[in-house]
Amino acid sequence: MGEITREDVEKYLGNNPQFAKEYFDKKLRVEVLGEVFKGSPASIQESTSFNEMTQVEESALIFELLQSMQDEAASMEAVVHRSLRRLCQLLSADRCSMFICRSRNGIPEVASRLLNVTPTSKLEENLVSPDKEAIFPLDIGIVGWVAHTKKSFNVPDVTKNSHFSDFLDKQTGYTTKNMLAMPITMGKEVLAVMMAVNKVNEPEFTKQDEETIYFTLSFPYNYSQVLLWSANKVFEELTDIERQFHKALYTIKAYLNCERYSIGLLDMTKEKEFYDEWPIKLGEVQPYKGPKTPDGREIIFYKIIDYILHGKEEIKVIQTPPADHWSLVSGLPTYVAEHGFICNMMNAPADEYFTFQKGPVDETGWIIQNVLSLPIVNKKEDIVGVVTFYNRKDAKPFDEYDEQITEILTQFLGWSLLNTDTYEKMNKLENRRDIAYEMLMYQTKATTGEIESILKLNTNIIEDCEEKQLIQILKEELPNPKDVELYEFHFSDFPITEHGLIKCGIQLFFEIKAVEKFKVPVEVLTRWMYTVRKGYRSVTYHNWRHGFNVGQTMFTLLMTGKLKKYYTDLEAFAMIAAAFCHDIDHRGTNNLYQMKSASPLAKLHGSSILERHHLEFSKTLLHDESLNIFQNLNKRQYETVIHLFEVAIIATDLALYFKKRTMFQKIIDTCEKMETEEEVIKYISIDPTKKEVIMAMMMTGCDLSAITKPWEIQSQVALMVANEFWEQGDLERTILQQQPIPMMDREKGDELPKLQVGFIDFVCTFVYKEFSRFHKEITPMWDGLQNNRVEWKSRADEYDEKMKVIEEEKKKQEANTAPKGCPKSFGVILSLKKKL
Ligand SMILES: [Zn+2]
């Protein structure tokens, strides 16, 4: 072929006006978009080579991509859809489609995801909902064949292709004539198949089209990376919000011309949990003086997502990274989070202000050269994270162009994803939560009939009755505290019916004179107490009986244990009420199970899942005036009550027990050294934090009080607890298909005595020993605990003895039957010696 002259081109264009139009359309579009990125490396006038053109196209694509992310909330389908529309135009195809490759039960298949995309069609028209998707095994249809062979196919006439299946045509009434299909691969894996159908105005797709589809799908726009997120393991380690983040950054990763980047996600909580503030308020821990974000948050990177793009691609998620993690140790991300600046550093290791790790950061031998770090800012202009890019792939320093692109990008992350999408979702979730609690409450609320079963009066008459009279009528129904031993640490609920326990509960409020002092209408009190009882489910252990026992023990600690002297009447009232509510609507499974089974509760609450649920439930009851036993308090008093509810109920999460242990002990140590009772009372009651710490420990003491009861009671309750655990273990085995821990494994039920001894030593001893050191009146609990330990220990020893005998029998038998030679463990000993 000779040299092409200007005349040749003009002549060709003149004879082929359609081609000329398409060519200039394409060119012009690129040029216009190229303008958007001023200073972009290629100018359209001079660029004729494919390479240079794609560079401009690339920036156009980033722009397109970012726009599509903003417009369509970064859904993968939306991004792909945009490109299919474009592809359809470039190929002059009648339509394009995308099929996703996946496997079910180990058998690979392809499923339609986007069908019949035209240059102008809308995503909603093309997106196939999961219940409508067409699924092909790999041995049927050209798409399946492409997925199977991992090769592209240009099929000029489908009727002559043995792999063609007319299944979809028959369903839609469309006639497929010719086809161009290409697999999108990631390593050896096929992620998707793109397909263009029926070339417009021509009998088949051309060689040129094959190139176009190849370049469009694989070079400037790396689909494999876009698609990866759907199958990525990393996903499992991220929360919903972080996934949005991850999706976005992973999508545009093809354009980030760097070897690595890492995102540090910042803790957004402005207020600390009460138990984390205690050490500061008690003066045991210095208040935080380190750097803060502009909106006043402590700078805590709670998670790092590390994208490694050099060598073998990898994504690492580092939960609660240590301060000396290579990506944080320089202090640059903290600096960016503090000031909100963009930092671009050419020779990072030589920097004097930030000390980057100089050698390799990991086993890959990779070292930091240059760095570009930016804050990710949300709509409210809070810094939600910091993204840091490392080492441009061409070894040049990051330039203004990189800064621009990355800045747009980080803004997008913060704005379009974190806020509009997730924020709204969170709001929706919050609304749904409120509705759910309202519904729960209406199901639970005591009926008039139920109230009349305690307050023996026709409800119609109640309204006309004077409160004094009502109190008299009610009191006649209530049990004598002495008869049922309400003031005793060894109180047992066994002889009392569940209905009777409601009356006992009401009686406790009369005993502390709360009804009179805080003008609690007795009808409301009855309704509330009955409703609390109904709020408990009939699970094996965490039922109303447990709820009542915790309330009764709180009462006994205050009155018999004399802890009341540190608290006001109102506080005592709130503490007993909170204790009654503390496990309301328990499901008989623990927090870990809620998380593992992805229960709706786990979606509503991040930590202390069940405890937060019990709290929300209790608070919802109080929102209903006819249940609000605190309705005659003033605003400040009511707020105090709610705060105490929060602290008391959340404190029953045993996971927090170790946080309060030393603080509690220190208070008691100090009190022990004081000479007069007045001094102690003053020292504690003057300081709300100390009162909270003691109250929180009281809640634990109440919650675990079954372990201090007389052996006849303790042995039975322990079996109930164990049974509930075993039931959870059964669920873990059947539903989650996981092996339960020994405590929840009914097959290891014989180990219960040993587990009890461990629980007593590890958790309970401290609580009751310290409380009886603090107040000698509480010693009966400590005595009861020690007695139960003796009982459990003797049973554990018995079991151990039995096991020993069995073991020895086994060994004897093995010794008789085993072949002579080197014992199995010998190899282990040898390898241990080598290490020494
Ligand atoms: Zn409990």
Image (cartoon, grey):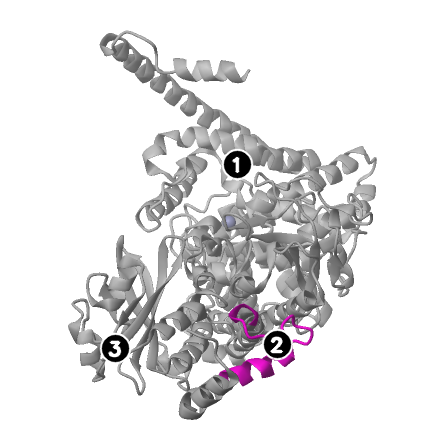
The disc, 1 or 3, on the residue closer to the chain's N-terminal end is 3
The disc, 2 or 1, on the residue closer to the chain's N-terminal end is 2
The kind of residue on which mark 2 rests is Glu
Camera-side residue: 600 or 156? 156
Image height of 456 relative to 587, above or below: below
Circles 1 and 3 in contact, beta carbons < 8 Å: no
Expressed as whole percent of the image width and height from the top left, the position of residue 821 reads 30, 7
Q: Which mark is residue 624?
A: none
> Is the residue indicated by label 3 positioned so its CB lies within 8 Å of ligand 1?
no
In the picture of the structure, the residue carrying the numbered disc 3 is 178
In the picture of the structure, the residue carrying the numbered disc 2 is 46
The disc, 3 or 2, on the residue closer to the chain's N-terminal end is 2
The kind of residue on which mark 1 rests is Thr
Which stretch is magenta? 25-52
Query: Of all residues shown, which one is farthest toward the front?
Result: 2
**Left-right relation of 310 to 158:** right
**Across the whole image, how many numbered discs are drawn on residues?**
3
Expressed as whole percent of the image width and height from the top left, the position of residue 701 reads 58, 43
> Is any atom of residue 576 visible in this view?
no
Q: Residues within 10 Å of mark 3 (few under 14, many from 20)?
A: some
In the picture of the structure, the residue carrying the numbered disc 1 is 708
Foreground mark, 2 or 1? Answer: 2
Camera-side residue: 122 or 197? 197
Image height of 399 relative to 683, above or below: below
Expressed as whole percent of the image width and height from the top left, the position of residue 209 reads 37, 75
For the N terminus, which image quadrant?
Answer: bottom left
Q: Residue drawn at (26%, 61%), measured in percent from left and top?
A: 109
